[in-house]
Amino acid sequence: MSHDYPNIARQILQGLGGRDNLEQAAHCVTRLRLVLKDPGLVKNAELNQVELVKGSFFTGGLFQVVIGPGEVEKVYAALREQTGLAAATIADVKKKGADKTNALQRLVRVFSDVFMPILPALIIAGLLMGINNLMGAKGMFIEGQTLLEAYPNLDGVWSLINLMANTSFVFLPALVGWSAAKRFGGSEILGIVLGLMLVHPDLLNAWNYGKAVAGLDGQSLPYFDIFGWFRIEKVGYQGQILPILMAAYVMSVIEKWLRAHVPNAIQLLVVPITTIVITGVLALAVIGPVTRHLGILITEGLVTLFDLAPMVGGLIFGLLYAPLVITGMHHMFLAVDLQLISTQGGTFIWPMIVMSNLAQGSAALAVFYTTRNARDKSMASTSAISAYFGITEPAMFGVNLRFKFPFYAALLGSALGSIFLSMSKVQASAIGVGGLPGFISIIPQFIPNFVVGMVIAIVVPFGLTCALNMKIVRPGYRVA
């Protein structure tokens, strides 16, 4: 369907309080991210009636208008053409709105800015790893055998896919180093070098750290002996997030200080080497060991909670994840997932995220099934499909939150599905697509229980939303 994007942009601009109220604009996959001079001038009722607009809200110092994948780019282009605003990135507008946020929102924004650019690489790696897990799972396709055992010729394909899948996780500190250095204002290439340093093959692989500490298999911790009076653990940080995140921040602070104090004529010679040497020593001697143990404490705390009270953990997560998406705080869970995968071999958080996404999609699908309003039906159908493939904002803001009880039904479905997964100890080996294809990234032995959880998260919100609709008279919404 063709849309009049210039007219849509014009109506959005009117709903925002006019051209003079708009300072800066950018967009993500689904939303316009806007810096407004006075959010009080926004006419929400008028704005939410504009074609393609699925909802709007103010959070993190920014006013956000939910449009949907694909369409948001065209609306943004039309908006820029009418206002004359320069192109801006999400980081630009977030920086502009930073003075309107509190400390927690700024911390969440850091996680979002660092991890969102590398998310595609992690999702691709997760899907490939999931395919490999399925090929190597005994009894998944052939009773008593893996596909590799039944068809030895697949071994080369399996090895090739495994190489591709592991690359993003083996060199994860380099990816985070690049993104974090960019976020903190340092040199991106130095961030990559720092990340690669933390996974250098001369260092003991992080996966063997526990064995070396315990003295198993004849292993012991190797050290850098500095002048005979100071020792630094010769240990890598494969798959870990906190060490490189903190090290990249320190590196950026050091580099920016040096650039401000070193004469221009010798900056190229002095700044990079000084930055890397100082930060490298600090990362291996102090930052790495401290943040490694902090990460271990965080993951062990989460694991203990879900071991002792899986029903409570699943209930809380299932109920709160979607509201956290509204605030943008859900980005923090990506770091938790990666830390769990690194230290525990799998994450129980990501499978529950899938439950929340499916529940939101099913509630929107129920609205599509019951509504008689053509615009609501169109919005609900496209939003449900989007949510089933991991993007829930159109379903939440455009449909479920507007009618309220579909959103509550989705929360209940998410909670019940998450409780079941938590009690069944379902884990994912990697991060994948947070929707219907999500089973690919689940550890094979847990796939049957994961599918049961999917059914719960899909059926409960759909059935409850339809049932509640029978009790509520809503013009244009009630089933004929």
Image (spheres, rainbow, N blue to C red):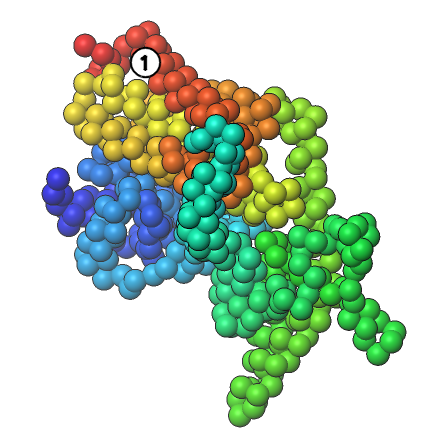
The answer to which of 24 and 428 lies nearer the viewer is 428
In the rendered image, the quadrant that contains the N terminus is top left
The answer to which of 15 and 461 lies nearer the viewer is 461
Q: Amino acid at mark 1?
A: Cys
Residue at screen point 34% across, 61% down:
88
Q: Quadrant of residue 475?
A: top left
Q: Which element is circle 1 on?
A: helix
In the rendered image, the quadrant that contains the C terminus is top left
Task: Give coordinates of residue 141: x percent, y percent.
Answer: 43, 31
Q: Which residue is denoted by mark 1 in the rendering? A: 466
Residue at screen point 46% across, 58% down:
95
Q: Quadrant of residue 246?
A: bottom right
Task: Give coordinates of residue 444: x percent, y percent.
Answer: 51, 34
Rendered position, 288 above or below 403: below
* Total numbered circles: 1
Task: Give coordinates of residue 454: x percent, y percent.
Answer: 43, 25
Task: Give coordinates of residue 459: x percent, y percent.
Answer: 38, 18
Task: In the displayed orientation, state which residue is furthest to the bottom.
Answer: 265
The answer to which of 448 and 378 lies nearer the viewer is 448
Crowd band around label 1 with a 10 angstrom C-alpha radius: few (<14), some (14–19), many (20+): many
Residue 204 is left or right of residue 426, and the answer is right
Task: In the displayed orientation, state which residue is furthest to the top.
Answer: 471
Residue 2 is left or right of residue 279, and the answer is left
Q: Quadrant of residue 357?
A: top left
Rendered position, 238 above or below 430: below
Residue at screen point 55% across, 34% down:
427
